[in-house]
């Protein structure tokens, strides 16, 4: 008995724990936006090359997730929402996560470079660097604007998808970046309003903690208002068209109305109905992004039939 | 505690090994597919530099 129990710690990692390190839910968003960026680009890509490219962009996103979990294990241990992640729960060692993250980063960037072009590969490397070093290591614990800057990392995938096809950057890909970049803060701050995670104990300066909940509500409204022009500009660009414009008009009107509702409420009103408006706004924010990029896809497929577009 | 020929730990390890095996297999298949696409593009002369070289 003693011999067996010496090696059986009971919580040895399974394959699924390593998959958890790659943050599969974040990966799905990366896959979707990168795919749209690649498809709407004006240069056709061989379907197999496109598939490979998106796979390695997703893997790069996963690698940065693993590196993020490696660095943030101390915070994750403190917060209820993240305490069951593979490292804080003891299923995967921190060193293993670091190794996996670094190895996958290298593989994904080199493979993207080989499959598509080296600009896209370098762009993916920059994105991983930005998310891990600039956001996770540097800014997340030092500024309440952490979400704003971290949003940039999440906004790069459609630009990488575009770069896979075109080998560069253009106004359209910058507008896709701007859409996700401006969308991220209201999305996360709405979550922070009703999730009430213990960020202050964990030493993360969330806006809700440093500037208060009333200021967070005003920030949500401000960013939602700033987001709308970018969404409309994207709709008027060469990858936009009537479908995208109609979608953008409806979605942004609803998004601004939702943000107005949040800005007008105080904590007492929100507590009374268990943050109903904040939860609804958060759910709608996911729909907002999905439909926006979905509309770009629809417009693109209409263009192949000689319809849609400007 | 009876010693079973197959401990629960072995089942979990098999899952991990199987998963890694599948990932590596998929990676090989991917490289093979990518090679086919790239080489056939070369033949069709879609890569200008390569087409020049063939002449």
Image (cartoon, grey):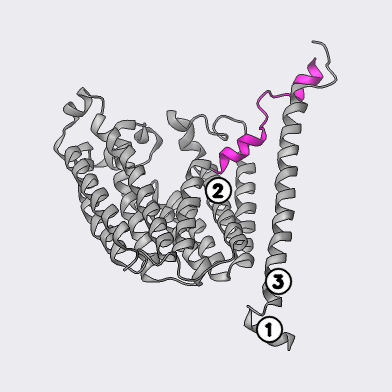
Q: In this rendering, would A122 be left or right of B38?
A: left
- Whichever of callouts 1 and 3 sits on the residue coming sooner in the sequence is 3
Are labels 3 and 2 assigned to the same chain?
no
| Res A239 quadrant in image | bottom left
Foreground tag (3 vs 2): 3
Q: Which residue is mark 3?
A: B40
The location of residue A279, given as percent across then percent down, is 30, 33
What residue is at 74 percent from the left and 32 percent from the top?
A: B13
Q: Which residues are magenta?
A: A1-22
Asked if the residues shown at circle 3 and circle 2 are in contact, with their CB atoms under 8 angstroms apart, the answer is: no
State if disc 3 and disc 1 touch (CB < 8 Å): no
Q: Position of residue A21 (x, y in %)?
A: 57, 41
- Give the residue number, with chain letter if any, for mark 2: A62
Q: Is residue A207 above or below residue A31?
A: above
**What percent of the width, then of the height, locates residue A209?**
28, 38
Whether residue B15 sits left or right of residue A240 in the image: it is: right
Q: Is residue A62 visible?
A: yes
Helix, strand or loop for disc 3: helix
**Quadrant (top left, top right, bottom left, bottom right) of the C terminus of chain A:** bottom left
Q: Chain of mark 1?
A: B
- Total labels: the figure holds 3
Distance Cα–Cα, label 3 vs label 2:
31 Å
**SS of the residue under disc 2:** helix
- Crowding near the residue tagged with mark 3, few <14, some 14–19, many ≥20 C-alpha atoms within 10 Å: few
Label 1 belongs to which residue? B51
């Amino acid at each position: 008995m003693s011999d067996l129990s010496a090696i059986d710690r009971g919580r040895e990692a399974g394959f699924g724990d390593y998959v958890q390190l790659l943050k599969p839910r974040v990966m799905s968003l990366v896959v979707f936006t990168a795919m749209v960026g690649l498809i709407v680009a004006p240069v056709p890509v061989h379907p197999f090359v496109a598939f490979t490219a998106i796979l390695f962009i997703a893997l790069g996103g996963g690698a940065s997730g693993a590196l993020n979990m490696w660095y943030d294990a101390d915070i994750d241990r403190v917060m209820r929402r993240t305490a069951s992640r593979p490292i804080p729960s003891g299923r995967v060692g921190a060193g293993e996560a670091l190794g996996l993250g670094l190895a996958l980063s290298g593989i994904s960037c080199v493979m993207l470079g080989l499959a598509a072009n080296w600009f896209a590969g370098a762009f993916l490397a920059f994105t991983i660097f930005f998310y891990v070093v600039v956001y996770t290591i540097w800014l997340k614990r030092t500024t309440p604007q952490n979400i704003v800057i971290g949003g940039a990392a999440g906004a790069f995938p459609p630009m990488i998808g575009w770069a896979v096809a075109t080998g560069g950057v253009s106004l359209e890909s910058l507008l896709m970046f701007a859409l996700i970049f401006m969308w991220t803060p209201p999305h996360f701050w709405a979550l922070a309003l009703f999730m009430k995670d213990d960020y202050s104990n964990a030493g993360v300066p969330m806006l809700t903690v440093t500037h208060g909940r009333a200021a967070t509500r005003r920030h949500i409204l401000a960013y939602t208002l700033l987001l709308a022009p970018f969404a409309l500009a994207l709709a008027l660009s060469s990858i936009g068209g009537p479908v995208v414009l109609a979608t953008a008009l409806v979605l942004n009107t609803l998004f601004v109305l939702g943000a107005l509702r949040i800005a007008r409420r105080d904590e007492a009103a929100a507590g009374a109905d268990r943050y109903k408006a904040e939860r609804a706004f958060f759910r709608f924010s996911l729909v907002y992004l999905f439909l926006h990029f979905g509309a770009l896809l629809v417009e693109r497929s209409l263009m192949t039939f000689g319809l849609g577009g400007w | 505690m009876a010693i079973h020929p197959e401990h629960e730990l072995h089942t979990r390890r098999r899952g991990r090994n199987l998963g890694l095996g599948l990932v590596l297999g998929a990676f090989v298949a991917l490289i093979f597919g990518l090679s086919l696409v790239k080489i056939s593009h070369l033949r069709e002369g879609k890569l200008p530099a390569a087409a020049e070289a063939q002449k």
